[in-house]
Image (cartoon, rainbow, N blue to C red):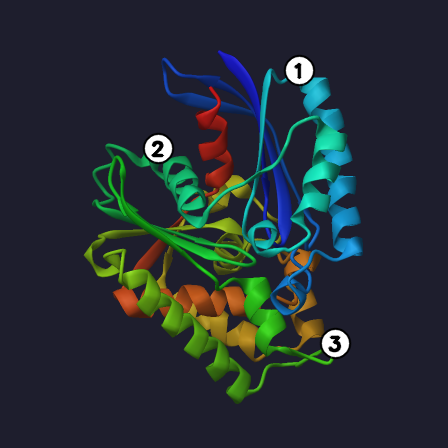
């Protein structure tokens, strides 16, 4: 048994998993799994740089995580950084800050590496389930990018594309610092156009339509599941492996796109840090399901974090 700590730092959130991994049984036992929304990718699509205030929010979360890792006595630590860090000119400032705080250098991984971690984290426990046909299409909708992976036991094809809930929101729904409330039809069409172009790009490498089971990961997808399940508080146990029909995804997406910021804040399971970006994330999921004619999405709470944890056992 090996005690490990995995950190996933994305465009919108930074997450920690401390777990005991047993390579013999293939079991990963959570000791601590948590998330902080830090919006590291604030403005990166426009400026190409990580903002000072975004860096400070991220370093504050790193200090919290450093204490937790020490308390749990994790023997191995791996810190993975994704889309926002890949895109930023000043990512060396981020690297130094994380190294000073956690004593481990963040690995700014490629989109393909991110996709592989997500795939293995999400599908490891699905192996052998008779009710879920393979191959799987795993989609990880992040803040700055979205990863598409097709495979069964192993990855057959993967592609990361630059659409994400934060990137699409900042690009199309915010003008001179003011967000549309709610989005106009023209703005929604602009997001759709970007998403469709990204799906075209993904399909050049990944046979999206050949998959038989769609598995959805990350905050946009789990939040949609929580809304679909009418949860009054976030419950990861209820959400994990929930099967959400396409009709319900479309209904929720329409609701989010036509509601104001204040109306979205009344949804009890919607984290305050996702209120402004969830509509774009939902539209990405709906567009993908339309493209591949998916009748449902299987939602997984296990994702890139689990894949990172297994990589250091």
Residue 232 image label: none
Compared to 232, does 266 lie above or below? below
204 lies left or right of 219:
left
Task: Give x and y (percent) for residue 125.
Answer: 35, 32
Q: Which one is earlier in the sequence, the residue at label 3 or at label 2? A: 2
Task: Give x and y (percent) for residue 203.
Answer: 28, 62
- Residue carrying label 3: 177
- The number of discs equals 3
User: Does the image show residue 190?
Assistant: yes
Are dots 1 and 3 in contact, CB under 8 Å?
no
- Residue carrying label 1: 73
Alpha carbons under labels 3 and 2: distance apart: 42 Å
User: Does the image show residue 241?
Assistant: no
Alpha carbons under labels 1 and 2: distance apart: 25 Å
Task: Give x and y (percent) for residue 218.
Answer: 50, 50
Which of discs 1 and 3 lies nearer the camera? The answer is 3
**Dot 2 alpha-carbon crowd within 10 angstroms: few under 14, some 14 to 19, many 20 or more:** some
Residue 124 image label: 2
Residue at 42% x, 38% y is: 117
């Amino acid at each position: 048994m090996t005690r490990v700590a995995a950190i996933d730092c994305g465009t919108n959130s930074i997450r920690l998993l401390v777990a005991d991994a047993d390579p013999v049984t293939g079991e990963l036992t959570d000791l601590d799994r948590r998330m902080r929304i830090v919006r590291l990718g604030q403005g990166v699509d426009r400026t190409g740089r990580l903002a000072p205030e975004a860096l400070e929010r991220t370093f504050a979360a790193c200090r919290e995580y450093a204490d937790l890792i020490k308390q749990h006595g994790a023997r191995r630590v791996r810190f993975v950084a994704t889309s926002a860090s890949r895109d930023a000119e000043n990512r060396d400032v981020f690297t130094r800050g994380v190294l000073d705080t956690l004593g481990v250098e963040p690995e700014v991984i490629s989109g393909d590496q991110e996709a592989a971690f997500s795939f293995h984290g999400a599908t490891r426990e699905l192996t052998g389930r008779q009710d879920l046909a393979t191959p799987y299409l795993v989609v990880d909708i992040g803040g700055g990018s979205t990863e598409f992976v097709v495979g069964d036991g192993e990855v057959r094809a993967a592609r990361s594309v630059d659409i994400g809930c934060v990137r699409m929101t900042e690009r199309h729904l915010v003008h001179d610092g003011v967000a549309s409330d709610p989005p106009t039809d023209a703005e929604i069409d602009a997001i759709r156009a970007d998403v469709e172009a990204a799906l075209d790009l993904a399909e050049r490498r990944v046979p999206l339509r050949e998959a038989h089971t769609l598995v959805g990961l990350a905050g946009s997808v789990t939040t949609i599941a929580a809304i679909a399940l009418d949860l009054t508080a976030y419950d990861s146990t209820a959400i994990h492996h929930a099967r959400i029909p396409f009709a319900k995804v479309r209904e929720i997406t329409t609701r989010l796109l036509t509601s104001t910021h204040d109306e979205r804040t009344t949804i009890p399971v919607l984290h305050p840090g996702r209120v402004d970006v969830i509509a774009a994330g939902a539209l990405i999921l709906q567009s993908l399901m339309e493209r591949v004619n998916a009748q449902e999405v299987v939602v997984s709470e296990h994702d890139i974090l689990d894949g990172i944890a297994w990589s250091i056992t």
